Image (cartoon, rainbow, N blue to C red):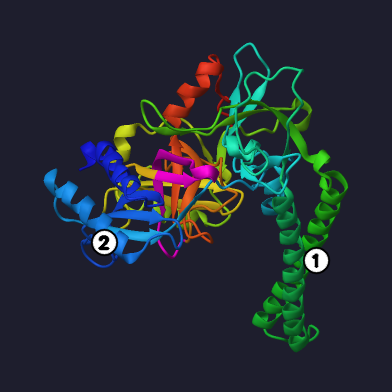
Protein backbone atom coordinates (compact mmCIF):
# COMPACT_ATOMS: atom_id res chain seq x y z
CA UNK A 1 0.00 0.00 0.00
CA UNK A 2 2.92 2.33 0.67
CA UNK A 3 3.79 2.81 -3.01
CA UNK A 4 0.24 3.95 -3.83
CA UNK A 5 -0.68 5.57 -0.53
CA UNK A 6 -1.03 9.13 -1.82
CA UNK A 7 -3.62 8.11 -4.41
CA UNK A 8 -5.35 5.78 -1.93
CA UNK A 9 -5.43 8.45 0.77
CA UNK A 10 -6.96 10.94 -1.67
CA UNK A 11 -9.66 8.40 -2.61
CA UNK A 12 -10.39 7.84 1.09
CA UNK A 13 -10.83 11.50 1.89
CA UNK A 14 -13.00 11.95 -1.21
CA UNK A 15 -15.22 9.13 0.10
CA UNK A 16 -15.40 10.89 3.45
CA UNK A 17 -16.29 14.18 1.76
CA UNK A 18 -18.97 12.49 -0.35
CA UNK A 19 -20.59 11.27 2.88
CA UNK A 20 -20.27 14.67 4.61
CA UNK A 21 -17.90 13.34 7.25
CA UNK A 22 -16.12 16.22 8.98
CA UNK A 23 -12.77 14.44 9.07
CA UNK A 24 -9.61 16.06 10.45
CA UNK A 25 -6.85 13.52 9.83
CA UNK A 26 -6.10 10.20 8.10
CA UNK A 27 -3.18 8.33 9.66
CA UNK A 28 -1.97 4.92 8.40
CA UNK A 29 -0.29 3.15 11.31
CA UNK A 30 0.00 -0.05 13.34
CA UNK A 31 0.18 -0.60 17.08
CA UNK A 32 2.33 -3.00 19.07
CA UNK A 33 2.93 -3.87 22.67
CA UNK A 34 6.67 -3.74 23.25
CA UNK A 35 8.09 -6.65 25.19
CA UNK A 36 10.57 -9.47 25.17
CA UNK A 37 11.36 -11.07 21.84
CA UNK A 38 10.14 -9.85 18.49
CA UNK A 39 7.45 -7.18 18.56
CA UNK A 40 4.15 -8.20 16.95
CA UNK A 41 2.25 -5.43 15.22
CA UNK A 42 -1.49 -5.10 14.79
CA UNK A 43 -2.97 -5.10 11.28
CA UNK A 44 -2.58 -1.81 9.41
CA UNK A 45 -5.06 0.69 10.84
CA UNK A 46 -6.48 3.48 8.72
CA UNK A 47 -7.11 5.81 11.65
CA UNK A 48 -9.53 8.58 10.76
CA UNK A 49 -9.90 11.61 12.99
CA UNK A 50 -13.22 13.44 13.01
CA UNK A 51 -14.41 16.63 14.65
CA UNK A 52 -15.74 16.02 18.18
CA UNK A 53 -19.41 14.98 18.36
CA UNK A 54 -19.76 15.14 14.56
CA UNK A 55 -20.02 11.45 13.55
CA UNK A 56 -22.91 9.08 14.28
CA UNK A 57 -22.39 5.36 14.79
CA UNK A 58 -24.46 4.57 11.71
CA UNK A 59 -22.50 6.94 9.45
CA UNK A 60 -19.20 5.59 10.78
CA UNK A 61 -20.25 2.05 9.84
CA UNK A 62 -21.44 3.14 6.41
CA UNK A 63 -18.21 4.98 5.60
CA UNK A 64 -16.00 2.20 7.01
CA UNK A 65 -17.76 -0.32 4.78
CA UNK A 66 -17.31 1.92 1.73
CA UNK A 67 -13.59 2.38 2.41
CA UNK A 68 -13.11 -1.34 3.07
CA UNK A 69 -14.93 -2.18 -0.18
CA UNK A 70 -12.72 0.22 -2.14
CA UNK A 71 -9.49 -1.12 -0.60
CA UNK A 72 -10.52 -4.73 -1.13
CA UNK A 73 -11.32 -4.05 -4.79
CA UNK A 74 -7.89 -2.44 -5.07
CA UNK A 75 -6.29 -5.70 -3.96
CA UNK A 76 -5.51 -4.90 -0.32
CA UNK A 77 -6.30 -6.99 2.74
CA UNK A 78 -5.27 -7.25 6.39
CA UNK A 79 -6.33 -3.73 7.32
CA UNK A 80 -8.78 -2.14 9.75
CA UNK A 81 -10.72 1.13 9.71
CA UNK A 82 -10.95 3.14 12.92
CA UNK A 83 -12.39 6.49 13.94
CA UNK A 84 -11.51 8.88 16.77
CA UNK A 85 -12.36 12.40 17.76
CA UNK A 86 -9.45 14.59 16.75
CA UNK A 87 -8.71 18.24 16.06
CA UNK A 88 -5.77 19.41 13.93
CA UNK A 89 -4.27 22.54 15.42
CA UNK A 90 -1.76 24.98 14.01
CA UNK A 91 0.08 25.31 17.30
CA UNK A 92 0.97 28.94 17.64
CA UNK A 93 2.44 30.28 21.39
CA UNK A 94 19.07 36.66 23.92
CA UNK A 95 21.98 35.85 26.02
CA UNK A 96 24.82 33.37 25.37
CA UNK A 97 24.13 29.71 26.07
CA UNK A 98 27.05 27.92 27.72
CA UNK A 99 25.97 24.77 29.60
CA UNK A 100 29.59 23.80 30.27
CA UNK A 101 30.43 26.88 32.35
CA UNK A 102 27.02 28.23 33.36
CA UNK A 103 25.60 26.66 36.54
CA UNK A 104 22.09 27.99 35.79
CA UNK A 105 22.14 27.37 32.04
CA UNK A 106 18.67 25.78 32.02
CA UNK A 107 17.14 29.04 33.30
CA UNK A 108 19.11 31.09 30.78
CA UNK A 109 18.17 28.84 27.85
CA UNK A 110 14.76 30.49 27.05
CA UNK A 111 16.52 33.84 26.68
CA UNK A 112 19.12 32.56 24.21
CA UNK A 113 18.99 32.10 20.42
CA UNK A 114 19.58 28.34 20.71
CA UNK A 115 17.18 26.51 18.38
CA UNK A 116 13.92 26.00 20.15
CA UNK A 117 13.76 29.79 20.50
CA UNK A 118 10.29 30.85 21.62
CA UNK A 119 8.83 33.70 19.55
CA UNK A 120 5.58 35.63 19.14
CA UNK A 121 4.21 38.58 17.16
CA UNK A 122 4.72 41.84 19.05
CA UNK A 123 1.07 42.83 18.72
CA UNK A 124 -0.33 39.46 19.80
CA UNK A 125 2.12 37.98 22.30
CA UNK A 126 -0.52 35.53 23.54
CA UNK A 127 -0.04 33.56 20.29
CA UNK A 128 3.33 31.85 20.46
CA UNK A 129 5.51 29.52 18.43
CA UNK A 130 9.09 28.45 17.86
CA UNK A 131 11.91 29.47 15.52
CA UNK A 132 13.06 26.74 13.11
CA UNK A 133 16.38 27.50 11.39
CA UNK A 134 18.76 30.40 10.80
CA UNK A 135 19.68 31.44 7.24
CA UNK A 136 21.97 33.97 5.66
CA UNK A 137 20.28 35.98 2.94
CA UNK A 138 23.28 35.59 0.64
CA UNK A 139 27.06 35.46 0.71
CA UNK A 140 27.14 39.19 0.04
CA UNK A 141 24.57 40.13 2.68
CA UNK A 142 25.01 40.35 6.43
CA UNK A 143 21.29 39.82 7.05
CA UNK A 144 20.42 36.76 9.13
CA UNK A 145 16.87 35.47 8.83
CA UNK A 146 14.86 33.01 10.92
CA UNK A 147 12.44 30.48 9.46
CA UNK A 148 9.17 29.71 11.23
CA UNK A 149 5.52 28.99 10.40
CA UNK A 150 3.37 31.64 8.76
CA UNK A 151 0.68 31.06 11.37
CA UNK A 152 3.21 31.88 14.09
CA UNK A 153 4.01 35.31 12.63
CA UNK A 154 0.40 35.91 11.60
CA UNK A 155 -1.88 33.98 14.00
CA UNK A 156 -5.20 33.05 12.34
CA UNK A 157 -7.35 34.80 15.00
CA UNK A 158 -5.55 38.08 14.20
CA UNK A 159 -5.13 37.36 10.46
CA UNK A 160 -8.22 35.37 9.37
CA UNK A 161 -7.06 35.55 5.76
CA UNK A 162 -3.32 35.20 5.27
CA UNK A 163 -2.68 36.77 1.87
CA UNK A 164 1.05 36.77 2.43
CA UNK A 165 3.83 39.31 2.52
CA UNK A 166 6.65 39.37 -0.03
CA UNK A 167 9.93 41.30 0.19
CA UNK A 168 8.58 43.87 2.63
CA UNK A 169 9.46 47.48 1.88
CA UNK A 170 9.30 50.58 4.08
CA UNK A 171 5.79 51.30 2.80
CA UNK A 172 4.42 48.41 4.89
CA UNK A 173 3.78 48.70 8.62
CA UNK A 174 6.49 46.79 10.42
CA UNK A 175 5.45 43.45 11.89
CA UNK A 176 7.78 43.01 14.85
CA UNK A 177 8.60 39.67 16.45
CA UNK A 178 9.57 39.20 20.09
CA UNK A 179 11.57 36.51 21.84
CA UNK A 180 9.22 34.86 24.32
CA UNK A 181 5.54 35.65 24.15
CA UNK A 182 3.30 36.07 27.14
CA UNK A 183 3.20 32.46 28.31
CA UNK A 184 6.82 31.70 27.45
CA UNK A 185 8.09 34.70 29.39
CA UNK A 186 5.95 34.02 32.45
CA UNK A 187 6.85 30.32 32.43
CA UNK A 188 10.55 31.16 32.32
CA UNK A 189 10.17 33.44 35.36
CA UNK A 190 8.07 30.88 37.22
CA UNK A 191 10.67 28.16 36.67
CA UNK A 192 13.24 30.35 38.41
CA UNK A 193 11.04 31.03 41.43
CA UNK A 194 10.09 27.35 41.68
CA UNK A 195 13.77 26.43 41.66
CA UNK A 196 14.48 28.93 44.44
CA UNK A 197 11.68 27.40 46.52
CA UNK A 198 13.07 23.91 45.87
CA UNK A 199 16.54 24.94 46.95
CA UNK A 200 15.06 26.43 50.12
CA UNK A 201 13.32 23.13 50.90
CA UNK A 202 16.57 21.23 50.34
CA UNK A 203 18.38 23.57 52.72
CA UNK A 204 15.81 22.82 55.44
CA UNK A 205 16.33 19.08 55.01
CA UNK A 206 20.12 19.34 55.01
CA UNK A 207 20.11 21.64 58.06
CA UNK A 208 18.00 19.07 59.88
CA UNK A 209 20.71 16.49 59.21
CA UNK A 210 23.38 18.93 60.43
CA UNK A 211 21.48 19.50 63.67
CA UNK A 212 21.46 15.77 64.30
CA UNK A 213 25.18 15.55 63.56
CA UNK A 214 25.95 18.45 65.91
CA UNK A 215 29.27 20.27 66.17
CA UNK A 216 32.51 18.55 65.35
CA UNK A 217 33.76 16.49 68.31
CA UNK A 218 37.27 15.36 69.05
CA UNK A 219 37.62 11.69 68.22
CA UNK A 220 34.44 11.43 66.15
CA UNK A 221 34.42 8.94 63.32
CA UNK A 222 35.72 9.89 59.89
CA UNK A 223 32.37 8.85 58.44
CA UNK A 224 30.49 11.37 60.62
CA UNK A 225 32.99 14.14 59.74
CA UNK A 226 32.62 13.40 56.03
CA UNK A 227 28.81 13.44 56.29
CA UNK A 228 28.86 16.83 58.06
CA UNK A 229 31.23 18.29 55.48
CA UNK A 230 29.06 16.93 52.68
CA UNK A 231 25.88 18.57 54.03
CA UNK A 232 27.62 21.85 54.81
CA UNK A 233 28.81 21.93 51.20
CA UNK A 234 25.28 21.15 49.96
CA UNK A 235 23.81 24.02 51.98
CA UNK A 236 26.50 26.40 50.76
CA UNK A 237 25.99 25.35 47.13
CA UNK A 238 22.20 25.77 47.42
CA UNK A 239 22.62 29.28 48.84
CA UNK A 240 24.94 30.19 45.97
CA UNK A 241 22.44 28.82 43.49
CA UNK A 242 19.61 30.84 45.06
CA UNK A 243 21.73 34.00 44.91
CA UNK A 244 22.65 33.36 41.28
CA UNK A 245 19.06 32.67 40.19
CA UNK A 246 17.81 35.71 42.11
CA UNK A 247 20.40 37.92 40.43
CA UNK A 248 19.46 36.57 36.99
CA UNK A 249 15.74 36.95 37.75
CA UNK A 250 16.26 40.62 38.66
CA UNK A 251 18.28 41.14 35.47
CA UNK A 252 15.45 39.70 33.36
CA UNK A 253 12.85 41.87 35.08
CA UNK A 254 14.91 44.96 34.30
CA UNK A 255 15.74 44.19 30.68
CA UNK A 256 13.06 41.80 29.39
CA UNK A 257 9.82 42.59 31.23
CA UNK A 258 8.11 44.57 28.46
CA UNK A 259 7.39 43.08 25.02
CA UNK A 260 9.06 45.99 23.26
CA UNK A 261 12.25 45.09 25.14
CA UNK A 262 12.12 41.62 23.64
CA UNK A 263 11.79 42.62 19.97
CA UNK A 264 14.41 40.69 18.00
CA UNK A 265 13.39 41.36 14.41
CA UNK A 266 10.62 41.88 11.89
CA UNK A 267 8.76 39.77 9.37
CA UNK A 268 10.08 40.12 5.83
CA UNK A 269 8.21 37.30 4.08
CA UNK A 270 5.01 35.40 4.75
CA UNK A 271 3.98 32.75 2.29
CA UNK A 272 0.25 33.00 1.49
CA UNK A 273 -1.59 30.20 3.26
CA UNK A 274 -2.32 27.29 0.94
CA UNK A 275 -3.11 23.61 1.39
CA UNK A 276 -2.49 20.56 -0.75
CA UNK A 277 -0.22 22.56 -3.05
CA UNK A 278 0.58 20.77 -6.33
CA UNK A 279 2.50 18.72 -7.22
CA UNK A 280 3.36 17.28 -3.79
CA UNK A 281 0.24 18.18 -1.83
CA UNK A 282 2.04 19.81 1.10
CA UNK A 283 1.02 22.88 3.11
CA UNK A 284 2.33 26.38 2.45
CA UNK A 285 2.83 27.63 5.99
CA UNK A 286 6.19 29.35 6.35
CA UNK A 287 7.58 32.80 7.02
CA UNK A 288 10.94 34.52 7.39
CA UNK A 289 12.00 37.00 10.06
CA UNK A 290 14.91 39.41 9.66
CA UNK A 291 16.89 39.43 12.91
CA UNK A 292 18.16 42.75 14.21
CA UNK A 293 21.93 42.72 14.30
CA UNK A 294 22.20 44.56 17.61
CA UNK A 295 19.98 42.03 19.39
CA UNK A 296 22.49 39.18 19.00
CA UNK A 297 26.03 38.60 20.14
CA UNK A 298 27.32 36.99 16.97
CA UNK A 299 30.66 36.15 18.59
CA UNK A 300 28.90 33.64 20.86
CA UNK A 301 26.10 32.70 18.44
CA UNK A 302 25.95 28.92 17.96
CA UNK A 303 23.93 28.83 14.76
CA UNK A 304 21.68 25.93 13.87
CA UNK A 305 22.15 23.71 16.90
CA UNK A 306 19.23 22.08 18.68
CA UNK A 307 19.48 21.58 22.44
CA UNK A 308 18.70 17.91 23.11
CA UNK A 309 19.20 18.17 26.87
CA UNK A 310 16.70 19.42 29.40
CA UNK A 311 13.98 16.76 29.45
CA UNK A 312 16.46 13.98 28.68
CA UNK A 313 19.76 13.13 30.30
CA UNK A 314 22.69 12.35 28.02
CA UNK A 315 22.33 8.67 29.01
CA UNK A 316 18.60 8.58 28.19
CA UNK A 317 19.15 10.30 24.84
CA UNK A 318 21.89 7.86 23.84
CA UNK A 319 19.93 4.76 24.86
CA UNK A 320 16.88 5.81 22.86
CA UNK A 321 18.54 7.19 19.73
CA UNK A 322 21.50 4.78 19.58
CA UNK A 323 20.20 1.60 21.24
CA UNK A 324 22.39 -1.05 19.57
CA UNK A 325 26.10 -1.82 20.01
CA UNK A 326 26.82 -1.11 16.36
CA UNK A 327 25.09 2.29 16.78
CA UNK A 328 27.10 3.15 19.86
CA UNK A 329 30.51 2.24 18.42
CA UNK A 330 31.18 5.73 17.07
CA UNK A 331 28.53 7.62 19.05
CA UNK A 332 29.36 10.63 21.19
CA UNK A 333 26.78 12.77 22.93
CA UNK A 334 26.67 16.21 21.24
CA UNK A 335 28.98 18.66 22.99
CA UNK A 336 26.97 20.63 25.57
CA UNK A 337 23.88 18.78 24.35
CA UNK A 338 23.80 20.87 21.15
CA UNK A 339 23.06 18.81 18.03
CA UNK A 340 24.24 20.52 14.84
CA UNK A 341 21.62 20.64 12.09
CA UNK A 342 23.38 19.59 8.91
CA UNK A 343 22.21 17.76 5.80
CA UNK A 344 18.71 16.61 4.86
CA UNK A 345 16.83 13.36 5.45
CA UNK A 346 15.97 12.08 1.94
CA UNK A 347 12.35 11.16 1.27
CA UNK A 348 13.34 7.54 0.67
CA UNK A 349 14.44 7.09 4.28
CA UNK A 350 11.00 8.05 5.52
CA UNK A 351 9.59 5.06 3.69
CA UNK A 352 12.57 2.74 4.28
CA UNK A 353 14.28 3.64 7.59
CA UNK A 354 17.94 2.68 7.96
CA UNK A 355 18.08 2.32 11.74
CA UNK A 356 16.38 0.21 14.43
CA UNK A 357 14.72 1.20 17.68
CA UNK A 358 15.36 -0.51 21.02
CA UNK A 359 12.91 -3.28 20.07
CA UNK A 360 14.69 -4.06 16.81
CA UNK A 361 12.06 -2.48 14.57
CA UNK A 362 13.26 -0.33 11.70
CA UNK A 363 12.10 3.24 12.20
CA UNK A 364 13.25 6.82 11.78
CA UNK A 365 13.67 8.36 15.23
CA UNK A 366 13.73 12.16 15.43
CA UNK A 367 14.27 14.90 18.01
CA UNK A 368 13.09 18.48 18.40
CA UNK A 369 13.14 21.30 20.92
CA UNK A 370 10.13 23.60 21.12
CA UNK A 371 8.55 26.22 23.34
CA UNK A 372 5.78 24.05 24.76
CA UNK A 373 7.36 20.63 25.33
CA UNK A 374 11.10 21.26 25.18
CA UNK A 375 13.23 18.33 23.99
CA UNK A 376 11.21 15.34 22.81
CA UNK A 377 11.84 12.23 20.71
CA UNK A 378 9.41 10.75 18.22
CA UNK A 379 9.12 8.13 15.51
CA UNK A 380 8.23 9.00 11.92
CA UNK A 381 5.36 7.16 10.25
CA UNK A 382 6.28 5.39 7.02
CA UNK A 383 3.43 6.92 5.01
CA UNK A 384 2.15 10.46 4.81
CA UNK A 385 -1.00 11.57 6.62
CA UNK A 386 -3.84 13.63 5.22
CA UNK A 387 -5.18 16.46 7.37
CA UNK A 388 -8.38 18.44 7.22
CA UNK A 389 -9.18 21.73 8.97
CA UNK A 390 -12.68 23.23 8.87
CA UNK A 391 -13.06 26.99 8.76
CA UNK A 392 -16.01 29.33 8.75
CA UNK A 393 -18.49 29.47 5.89
CA UNK A 394 -17.97 25.83 4.97
CA UNK A 395 -14.36 26.23 3.84
CA UNK A 396 -12.43 22.95 4.10
CA UNK A 397 -8.63 22.73 3.93
CA UNK A 398 -6.95 19.44 3.09
CA UNK A 399 -3.23 18.79 3.02
CA UNK A 400 -0.49 16.17 3.00
CA UNK A 401 1.84 15.95 6.00
CA UNK A 402 4.77 13.95 7.32
CA UNK A 403 3.52 12.47 10.59
CA UNK A 404 5.48 11.83 13.80
CA UNK A 405 4.25 9.76 16.73
CA UNK A 406 5.49 10.03 20.33
CA UNK A 407 8.39 7.64 20.97
CA UNK A 408 6.37 5.86 23.66
CA UNK A 409 3.64 6.44 26.21
CA UNK A 410 6.30 6.78 28.90
CA UNK A 411 8.11 9.64 27.13
CA UNK A 412 4.92 11.66 26.60
CA UNK A 413 3.78 13.86 23.73
CA UNK A 414 6.13 14.77 20.90
CA UNK A 415 4.59 18.25 20.59
CA UNK A 416 1.91 20.59 21.86
CA UNK A 417 0.51 24.00 20.85
CA UNK A 418 3.39 26.46 20.98
CA UNK A 419 5.84 24.07 19.29
CA UNK A 420 4.89 25.16 15.76
CA UNK A 421 8.00 26.17 13.87
CA UNK A 422 10.29 23.72 15.67
CA UNK A 423 12.81 22.04 13.40
CA UNK A 424 12.89 18.24 13.57
CA UNK A 425 16.20 16.37 13.15
CA UNK A 426 17.24 12.74 12.94
CA UNK A 427 19.80 11.35 15.35
CA UNK A 428 22.72 12.53 13.19
CA UNK A 429 21.39 16.09 12.90
CA UNK A 430 19.97 15.73 9.40
CA UNK A 431 16.93 17.95 8.89
CA UNK A 432 13.60 16.20 8.39
CA UNK A 433 11.11 19.06 8.46
CA UNK A 434 9.41 21.94 10.25
CA UNK A 435 6.63 21.25 12.73
CA UNK A 436 3.38 22.86 11.59
CA UNK A 437 0.72 21.32 13.82
CA UNK A 438 -0.76 18.18 15.27
CA UNK A 439 -3.90 16.14 15.72
CA UNK A 440 -5.61 14.70 18.75
CA UNK A 441 -8.20 15.73 21.27
CA UNK A 442 -8.58 19.44 21.86
CA UNK A 443 -6.47 18.99 25.01
CA UNK A 444 -3.60 17.00 23.51
CA UNK A 445 -1.58 16.14 20.42
CA UNK A 446 -0.86 12.49 19.72
CA UNK A 447 0.19 12.86 16.07
CA UNK A 448 2.52 15.70 15.01
CA UNK A 449 2.68 17.01 11.44
CA UNK A 450 5.67 18.38 9.54
CA UNK A 451 6.38 19.97 6.19
CA UNK A 452 9.52 18.29 4.79
CA UNK A 453 12.62 20.46 4.68
CA UNK A 454 13.64 19.47 1.16
CA UNK A 455 10.34 20.99 0.01
CA UNK A 456 10.61 24.09 2.23
CA UNK A 457 14.13 24.85 1.04
CA UNK A 458 13.04 24.80 -2.59
CA UNK A 459 10.10 27.11 -1.81
CA UNK A 460 12.33 29.56 0.08
CA UNK A 461 14.78 29.72 -2.80
CA UNK A 462 11.99 30.81 -5.16
CA UNK A 463 11.94 34.10 -3.24
CA UNK A 464 15.46 34.20 -1.79
CA UNK A 465 17.52 32.31 -4.40
CA UNK A 466 20.86 32.95 -2.71
CA UNK A 467 19.80 32.11 0.85
CA UNK A 468 21.62 29.31 2.63
CA UNK A 469 21.69 27.79 6.11
CA UNK A 470 23.76 29.71 8.64
CA UNK A 471 27.34 28.50 8.67
CA UNK A 472 28.24 25.58 10.92
CA UNK A 473 29.69 27.03 14.12
CA UNK A 474 32.64 25.15 15.58
CA UNK A 475 33.11 25.56 19.32
- The residue at 64%/81% (across/down) is 223
Marks counted in the figure total 2
Q: Position of residue 325 (x, y in %)?
A: 31, 51
Label 2, secondary structure: give it. Answer: helix
Q: Pointer 1: residues within 10 angstroms few (<14), some, or many (20+)?
A: some
First in sequence: mark 1 or mark 2? 2
- On whether residue 393 falls in the magenta region, the answer is yes
**Horizontal side of residue 176 vs 166, given as left or right:** right
- On whether residue 283 falls in the magenta region, the answer is no
Regarding residue 354, the answer to whether it shows in the image is no
Q: Is residue 282 above or below residue 170?
A: below
- Looking at the image, which is closer to me, 83 or 57? 57
- Which disc, if any, is residue 61? 2
Q: CA distance from mark 1 to mark 2?
A: 64 Å
In the picture as drawn, the residue positioned furthest to the bottom comes out as: 212
Q: Which residue, given by chain and number where applicable, does mark 1 sit on?
A: 239
Contact? badges 1 and 2 (CB < 8 Å): no
- Looking at the image, which is closer to me, 25 or 433? 25
Q: Which residues are magenta?
A: 387-411
Q: Is residue 442 above or below residue 354?
A: below
- The residue at 59%/30% (across/down) is 287
**Horizontal side of residue 315 vs 154, given as left or right:** left
Label 1, secondary structure: give it. Answer: helix
Q: Quadrant of residue 164?
A: top right
In the picture as drawn, the residue positioned furthest to the right comes out as: 254
Q: Position of residue 102 (x, y in %)?
A: 70, 49
Overall secondary structure of the magenta stretch?
A: strand
Q: Quadrant of residue 238?
A: bottom right
Amino acid sequence: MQANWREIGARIYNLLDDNNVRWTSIDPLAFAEAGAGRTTFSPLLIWIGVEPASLTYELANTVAEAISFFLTLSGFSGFEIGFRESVVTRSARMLPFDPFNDTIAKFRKPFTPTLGLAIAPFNTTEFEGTGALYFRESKDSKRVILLTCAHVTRPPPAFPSNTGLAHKTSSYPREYVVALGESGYNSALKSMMDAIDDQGDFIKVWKSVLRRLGDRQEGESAKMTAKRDEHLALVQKARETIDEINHFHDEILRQWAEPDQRIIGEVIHVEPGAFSVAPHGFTHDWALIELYDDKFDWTTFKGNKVYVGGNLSSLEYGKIMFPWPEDQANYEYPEDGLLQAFGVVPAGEIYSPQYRDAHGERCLLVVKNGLATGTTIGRVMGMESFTRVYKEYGIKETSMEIAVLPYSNATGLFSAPGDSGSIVLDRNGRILGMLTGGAGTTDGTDVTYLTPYWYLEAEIKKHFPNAFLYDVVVN
